[in-house]
Image (spheres, helix red, strand yellow):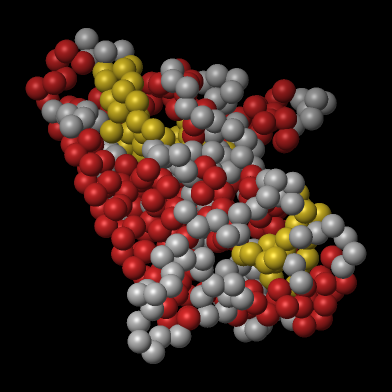
């Protein structure tokens, strides 16, 4: 796996965001907060954020000359060795920025790839990440100051008349083709495994990253799936057999979504997302305590539209109700007012989801019985429709 830009633990970084047309300052600040969380997940410490309002990003350096000089003046003499841009940069932009700042520069996509590379444990996840890394690298080769380190370099590897950049491109394309073939073989094995699961209703947890999907997976399936307060704690899909009141079904935890998720990463993780495509019911988990939870909900819905799975039954789970109440209510608020606010919140989302929503706290185990009852009702309904001959022993 390529790791020429792996982030070292406790590297100090500054973040750079651009407010483009159709965006406001509040949005860009939120994007930079999320970028800081991504950086923290990768092991870096954010020292300062820079923001610039531009109608269009500069084709050479993304930000304007004055802003770049301001960033350079700030990092000069300080122990800062990393600059992270919130938007995707071209290879030539990275080269030009590094010439001015004299500090390693990466973009949001590169940062996410770094996190995925750290989190990948299985052969499938590692292959998916490596493929995404090479797909990211290919269009940036021309602008990179440092070309690929090649294990098979030397006599016999370079065609007649090829330049170094052409050779590097050919090597990367061959590597991409090899990884795709390898991934196809892994996908075939995964597809066979999914087919062997029998006639079970499949339920998949989906949602923005770090909303508590793995915690809910652990609570519902009584298993020990890795859960952590960091972005992309789960990369590999985990599937467990769950039984509610004699009714069995398969429950899968999937990789979290995020805004500006690199397209090549989505493409590489197609097989992981097949769990979402092949699911019968989706549990869309939302972090109710997040100040912009509605934006996160919309990002996930948009991704589900891109995956063409919007026709499936969806139960929206508003998680972290305990944190929401701590953030929204102070101790002096009268119980009647508190209940009225919660009632209006429930009523609003009952209407928005046509009654297909549940409010819970997975950590406090609040209203988990209500969640189980809602899931059980949907699962049994699908069994009746698809496998009526099975329902007699399941619904005793």
Q: Quadrant of residue 101?
A: bottom right
Left or right, 141 with reference to 73:
left
- The residue sitting at 26% across, 41% down in the picture is 190
Farthest-out residue, left: 389
Farthest-out residue, top: 396
Point out residue 311 in the picture as x, y percentages from the top left corner.
29, 49
Point out residue 200 in the picture as x, y percentages from the top left corner.
22, 28
* Residue in front for this viewpoint, 50 or 156: 156
- The residue sitting at 54% across, 72% down in the picture is 147
* Residue in front for this viewpoint, 323 or 162: 162
Farthest-out residue, right: 77
* Residue in front for this viewpoint, 23 or 353: 23
Farthest-out residue, front: 155
Query: Quadrant of the image for the C terminus?
Result: top left
- The residue sitting at 70% across, 58% down in the picture is 32
Q: Quadrant of residue 230?
A: top right
Above or below, 53 against 224 in this view is below
Point out residue 315 in the picture as x, y percentages from the top left corner.
40, 36
* Residue in front for this viewpoint, 145 or 329: 145
Residue 207 visible from this viewpoint: no
Left or right, 261 with reference to 202:
right
Above or below, 64 against 247 in this view is below
- The residue sitting at 65% across, 84% down in the picture is 60
């Amino acid at each position: 796996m390529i790791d020429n830009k792996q982030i070292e633990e406790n590297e100090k970084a500054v973040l750079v965001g651009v407010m483009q047309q159709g965006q406001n300052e509040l949005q860009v600040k939120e994007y930079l907060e999320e970028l800081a969380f991504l950086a923290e997940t990768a092991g870096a410490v954010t020292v300062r954020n820079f923001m610039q309002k531009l109608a269009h990003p500069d084709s050479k350096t993304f930000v304007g000359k004055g802003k770049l000089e301001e960033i350079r003046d700030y990092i000069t003499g300080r122990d800062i060795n990393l600059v992270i841009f919130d938007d995707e940069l071209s290879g030539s932009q990275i080269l030009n920025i590094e010439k001015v700042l004299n500090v390693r520069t990466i973009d949001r996509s590169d940062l996410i790839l770094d996190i995925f590379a750290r989190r990948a444990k299985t052969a499938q996840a590692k292959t998916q990440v490596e493929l995404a890394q090479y797909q990211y690298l290919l269009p940036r080769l021309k602008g990179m100051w440092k070309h690929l380190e090649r294990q098979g370099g030397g006599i016999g590897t370079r065609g007649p008349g090829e330049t170094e950049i052409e050779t590097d491109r050919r090597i990367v394309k061959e590597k991409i083709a090899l990884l795709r073939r390898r991934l196809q073989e892994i996908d075939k094995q995964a597809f066979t495994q999914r087919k062997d699961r029998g006639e079970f209703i499949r339920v998949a947890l989906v949602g923005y990253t770090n909303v508590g999907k793995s915690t809910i997976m652990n609570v519902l399936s009584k298993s020990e799936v890795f859960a952590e307060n960091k972005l992309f704690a789960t990369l590999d899909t985990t599937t467990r057999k769950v039984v509610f009141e004699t009714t069995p079904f398969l429950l899968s935890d999937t990789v979290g979504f995020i805004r500006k998720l690199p397209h090549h990463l989505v493409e590489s993780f197609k097989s992981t997302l097949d769990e979402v495509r092949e699911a019968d019911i989706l549990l869309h988990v939302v972090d109710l305590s997040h100040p912009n939870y509605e934006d996160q909900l919309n990002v996930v819905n948009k991704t589900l539209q891109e995956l063409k799975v919007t026709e499936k039954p969806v139960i929206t789970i508003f998680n972290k109700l305990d944190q929401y109440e701590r953030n929204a209510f102070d101790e002096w608020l009268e119980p009647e007012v508190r209940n009225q606010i919660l009632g209006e919140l429930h009523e609003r989302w009952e209407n928005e989801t046509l009654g297909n929503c549940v409010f819970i706290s997975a950590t406090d185990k609040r209203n988990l019985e209500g969640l189980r009852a809602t899931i059980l009702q949907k699962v049994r309904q699908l069994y009746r429709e698809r496998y009526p001959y099975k329902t007699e022993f399941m619904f005793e």
